[in-house]
Image: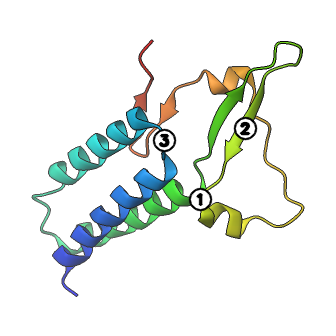
Amino acid sequence: MSTRTRILSGYRRLLRASRLSFEGDTFAIKQSRATLRNQFVENKAISDPNALEDVLKGIEEAESMLLHHIVQGKRVDKSDEPSRFKVKLTDPQKKNMSQNEELTPITSKSSAESIIIHSGNACTRPE
């Protein structure tokens, strides 16, 4: 498979992974798609084979990050309890967790923080 084909395939995989990771969160999906598109447009002119291999490695790392390291949490409002969140895991995350593994609790402070996109850009939800 040619390098160009592998990169385009990777782009499609990243779009699918972002859709799966941010399912139900239209804002996050739009932001991740825009960031992915911008990154691919910026790297469009790269022709050096070594640099292209680095791009392919970055695609694989970003896909892994999206599929395995991003967890959606939704606040469950109960006035008599401290903030509690319902966490939604993707299938790849469920497969990689051991039976007794626990997630780090999400706090009110961490839920209010920005969403971090792979490129390092922060995207915050509009008020």
The residue tagged 2 is 86
Q: Residue at x 43, y 46 (%)?
A: 118
Mark whose residue sits in front, 1 or 2: 2
* Rendered location of residue 76, percent (x, y): 73, 27
- Mark 3 vs 1, N-terminal side: 3
Q: Is residue 34 above or below residue 2?
A: above
The residue tagged 3 is 24
The residue tagged 1 is 68
- Mark 3 vs 2, N-terminal side: 3
**Other residues around mark 2 within 10 Å, as few (<14) / some (14–19) / many (≥20):** few
Mark whose residue sits in front, 3 or 1: 3
Secondary structure, mark 3, is: loop
Q: Quadrant of residue 122?
A: top left
- Front residue of 110/87: it is 87
- Front residue of 94/1: it is 94
Coloration of the structure image? rainbow
Secondary structure, mark 1, is: helix
